Image (tube, rainbow, N blue to C red):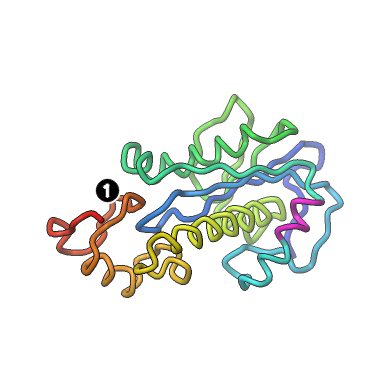
Amino acid sequence: MLKRYFNKYAIEAGCDEAGRGCLAGDVFAAAVILPKNFKNNLLDDSKKLSDKQRKLLRPIIETNAIAWAVGRVSAQEIDEINILNASLLAMHRAIDKLTTTPNHLLIDGNRFKSYNFIPHTCIIQGDSKYMSIAAASILAKTYRDDYMDKLHEEFPHYGWSNNRAYGTKVHRDAIREHGITPYHRVSFKLIEEIDNIKQV
């Protein structure tokens, strides 16, 4: 059973990211402030849910949240500042867009850079422990999936509608055959013979 809050008296925003380990595309993050009395028995870490369950939960979260927002950082920015910094920046961008200002942040994972002096708590596997982080994980994941579906229409060879740009055999084989796109993260080890990759 997920916990409703870390601090009963704080305005808490749960934060999580999606797409950190992918070879292409933006990294997404979400921030969600839920009411203290929010209940939903299906809500869980997005990785434990099916695509259908995540799509069912997204409008429930958006409708019931006190505030929610999604931020993103491009592949080009990822190459410039590295994926860890990009993931944290995506969280900052999501927090910055919240219509209600939180006074405590719950961060999934063990790393964060302070945002506007708001106190924060890093929680390893927080998306399977706290409702607000789980909700953020679902929004980040579903918005990124929608984004990858659109990119798939532009570059269907890479199978992004299925692999979401993770380093599957299908994706890596497509890189070998077709080269890379402007959406690939060139700072990542895309395939072994990276020096021979062309750009499409």
Q: Residue 13 placed where, x, y %?
A: 69, 41
Does 164 appear above or below 37? below
Q: Residue 169 placed where, x, y %?
A: 31, 74
Query: Quarter holding the C terminus?
Result: bottom left
Lateral position of residue 92 relative to residue 74, left or right: right
Q: Residue 194 placed where, x, y %?
A: 17, 58
Residue 59 on the magenta segment: yes
**Residue situated in front as seen by the camera: 199 or 73:** 199
Q: Residue 18 placed where, x, y %?
A: 51, 54
**Residue situated in front as seen by the camera: 124 or 157:** 157
Which residue type carries mark 1?
Ser
Question: For the magenta stretch, what is the residue range?
Answer: 58-63
Does 99 appear above or below 17? above
Label 1 Cα neighbours within 10 Å, binned few <14 / some 14-19 / many ≥20: some
Query: Quarter holding the N terminus?
Result: bottom right
Q: Residue at x 61, y 55 (%)?
A: 137
Q: Residue at x 72, y 55 (%)?
A: 131
Q: Residue at x 83, y 59 (%)?
A: 39
| Residue picked out by circle 1 | 187
